[in-house]
Image (cartoon, grey):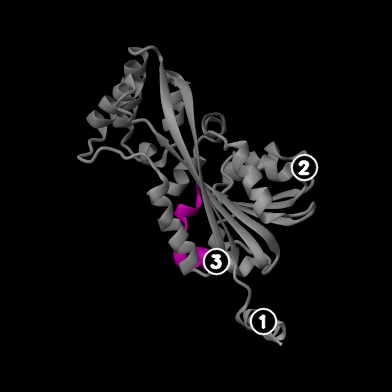
């Protein structure tokens, strides 16, 4: 089973259940990229548009690429009021996109589905010189041993999806992996930032949320239904709510200019230093 296709089965629940992203994250992207109205922006893996609206509201010309046909059609209707928006139903690596056209490429909790070598190479081919890449993810954590609502959910996970290693909450130490990747694939001026929040969901809302997870939907149907029933009951027994501890990580970088341009820039810099020495 291609787990990427599991997101395409219930677009309405996906849109209702998946969280959006902090306002501060978008403000940091806008400050770093410093784009003007009408700039060309590409979103990789729009889903149901949890990260899309802030870019449209700034009047950027946004093109989105989405693998799922139902998700793509849903977003086509969802953002139909914007004339600065278009969507392509395609695998990102196969999508026919104009080279050196985009001022900004971004992907929200989706880029990990794309092979690194081909994914980064294609992004570099699409970005203008000094174009910006923004990657960000949301990491929900429900294994806080000091939270009784998390202890209840952990017992259900251990029953149906046992794991010898307890889940570890995402933190700053894990950011270095993506930072190293960006540097390895030729990006510069790399910045990263962490945002944290706590969400509180009812038992029904949480079951609807886990139905949007690819690994959950990959379970055999009988096990999946029993898992959901026991999860709802466990949360109801501790008050009917569960706390989710989110960590959102953002990475910002710019594509390196072509080698010839870099050489010209370095030469100008050397000439300037020599002139200052005279």
Residue at 45% across, 42% down: 6
Mark 3 neighbour density, 10 Å: few (under 14) some (14–19) many (20 or more): many
Mark earlier in primary sequence (1, 3):
3
Camera-side mark, 3 or 2: 3
Mark 1, secondary structure of its residue: helix
Question: For the residues marked 2 and 1, what is the alpha-carbon distance in whole angstroms?
Answer: 49 Å
Q: Quadrant of residue 16?
A: top right
Residue 90 appears at what percent x and percent y?
Answer: 58, 55
Residue 128 x/y as whole percent? 68, 67
The mark found on residue 82 in the picture is 2
Which numbered tag is attached to residue 187? 3
Place of residue 108 in the rendered image (x, y in percent of width and height, measured from the top left): 55, 47
Q: Is residue 100 left or right of residue 233?
A: right
Q: Marks 1 and 3, how far apart in space?
A: 26 Å
Q: Is residue 3 visible?
A: yes
Query: What is the magenta segment's predominant secondary structure?
Result: helix
- Determine the image quadrant of residue 261: bottom right
Q: Nearer the viewer, residue 126 or 264?
A: 264
Q: Is residue 211 magenta?
A: no
* Left-right relation of 267 to 225: right
Determine whether the residue tagged by mark 3 lies in a helix, strand or loop: strand
> Which labelled disc corresponds to residue 273?
1
Cβ–Cβ under 8 Å for marks 2 and 1? no
Mark 3 vs 2, N-terminal side:
2
Q: Residue at x 71, y 87 (%)?
A: 278
Name the residue located 69 percent from the left edge and 38 percent from the top edge: 77
**Circle nearer the N terminus (2, 1):** 2
The magenta span reads 109-121
Picture coordinates of residue 55, whole percent (x, y): 69, 45
């Amino acid at each position: 089973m291609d787990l990427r296709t599991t997101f395409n089965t219930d677009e309405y629940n996906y849109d209702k259940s998946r969280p959006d992203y902090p306002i501060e994250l978008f403000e940091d992207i806008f400050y770093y990229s410093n784009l003007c109205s009408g700039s060309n922006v590409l979103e990789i893996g729009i889903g149901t548009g949890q990260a899309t609206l802030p870019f449209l509201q700034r009047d950027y010309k946004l093109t989105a690429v989405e693998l799922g046909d139902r998700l793509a059609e849903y977003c086509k209707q969802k953002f139909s009021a914007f004339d600065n928006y278009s969507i392509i139903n395609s695998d990102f690596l196969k999508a026919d996109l104009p080279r050196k056209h985009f001022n900004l490429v971004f992907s929200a909790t989706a880029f990990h589905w794309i092979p690194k070598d081909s994914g980064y190479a294609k992004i570099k081919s699409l970005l203008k010189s000094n174009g910006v890449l923004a990657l960000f993810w949301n990491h929900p954590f429900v294994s806080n041993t000091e939270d009784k609502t998390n202890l209840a959910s952990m017992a259900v996970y251990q029953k149906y999806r046992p794991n010898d290693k307890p889940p570890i909450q995402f933190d700053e130490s894990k950011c270095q992996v993506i930072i190293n990747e960006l540097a390895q694939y030729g990006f510069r001026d790399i910045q990263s930032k962490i945002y944290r929040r706590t969400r509180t969901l009812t038992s029904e809302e949480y079951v609807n949320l886990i139905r949007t997870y690819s690994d959950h939907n990959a379970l055999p149907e009988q096990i999946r239904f029993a898992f959901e029933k026991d999860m709802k009951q466990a949360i109801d027994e501790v008050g009917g709510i569960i706390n989710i501890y989110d960590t959102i990580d953002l990475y910002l970088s710019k594509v390196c200019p072509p080698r010839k341009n870099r050489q010209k820039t370095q030469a100008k810099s050397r000439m300037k230093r020599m002139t200052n020495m005279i």
